[in-house]
Image (spheres, helix red, strand yellow):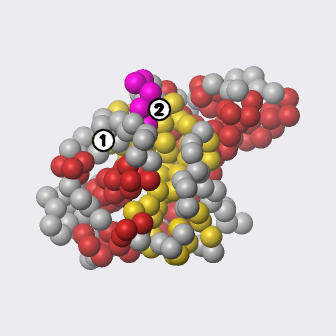
Amino acid sequence: MAIKKKFTQGIHKIPSGLCFKNRSFRCEEGKLKGLTTGHLKNKYYKDFDLKNAVYEDTISPHCSYENDNVKATKNTCYSTKARMARGRKVDSMIGQAIEWMLMYNLHQNTFCKAHSVPKELDKKYKTWMKNDPARLVFCLLSKMSLKPVATQVIVADKANKLSTAVDLVCKDKSNKYMLIEIKAINVLTMLKSSKQMKDLPLTNCYLNQSFLQLASTRQMYIKTFPSNELSESAYTFVVNNKSCTAYKLPALLKTKRIY
């Protein structure tokens, strides 16, 4: 059964006048176009095809957390549909954990190692802890001193009729908001490319595609929540059963208008 995505979960103001209805983002003026459903691809990497991506980019990670379960198996999704389904699963479980943190006053480390939880949550919690990718996201967040506060937060640029959702919003040690894009995929697949992007000094690998999405989302977040103090840093987390790795948004994308 397909997982229905929930939007703006956790401690975060629901954007005024924005909603998700009839499979699309909407505002007072009507339907908004999705950022990732063709817009960025048509502009920067229209010809990308993973089957033809024979080169491997070398992008250094910022931080990583390796699975402490030596029996963890490699989970490879060969189709786009399968990768998207796995991504939705991870998104859903992160959102569920944040809801439990609020409802039961649980510390985020409860989702890194097994802890005692309220009796009514015990069965669901044990099932949750068996999902390595979601657990590894929380492990890496703790390692980077980041507190998850909300998932799937809707943001938009109404003037350009574009909208998307932030995968994960955290608070850093300075209490600033930080945005994280989550890709549930193996690292080697994320780094495969075929050529340069149009008008950018970046290859067209999945990781760089995610950086464009992250940079655009960050710019829309500023428009949607102008009073929220945003961290200078933002990350793409690449997660699978084996590890969760953080890649920092390149400096060249922070000031450039992407979308």
- Image point (53%, 35%), residue name: 148
In the rendered image, which quarter is residue 43 located in?
bottom left
Q: How many callouts does the rendering have?
A: 2
Q: Quadrant of the N terminus?
A: bottom right
Q: What's the magenta region?
A: 173-177
Q: Quadrant of the C terminus?
A: bottom left
Q: Which mark is residue 29?
A: none
Q: Residue 99: where, in percent of width, then height?
A: 68, 40
Q: Residue 89: where, in percent of width, then height?
A: 61, 54
- Image point (70%, 26%), residue name: 105
Q: Secondary structure at mark 2?
A: strand
Q: Which mark is residue 171?
A: 2
Q: Which residue is mark 1?
A: 248
Question: Which residue type does callout 2 highlight?
Answer: Lys
Vertical order, 227 against 157 (above or below): above
Q: Residue 154: where, in percent of width, then height?
A: 52, 56
Query: Closest to the observer: 159 or 126?
Result: 159
Q: Secondary structure at mark 1?
A: strand
Please report whichever mark, 2 or 1, sits nearer to the chain's N-terminal start.
Answer: 2
Taking the image as drawn, is residue 125 in sight? yes
- Image point (24%, 48%), residue name: 254
Left or right of 16? Residue 218 is: left
Nearest to viewer (mark 2 / mark 1): 2
Q: Residue 114: where, in percent of width, then height?
A: 67, 26
In the image, residue 165 lies in the stretch drawn in magenta: no
Left or right of 67? Residue 207 is: left
Vertical order, 145 against 133 (above or below): above
Query: Closest to the observer: 126 or 110?
Result: 110
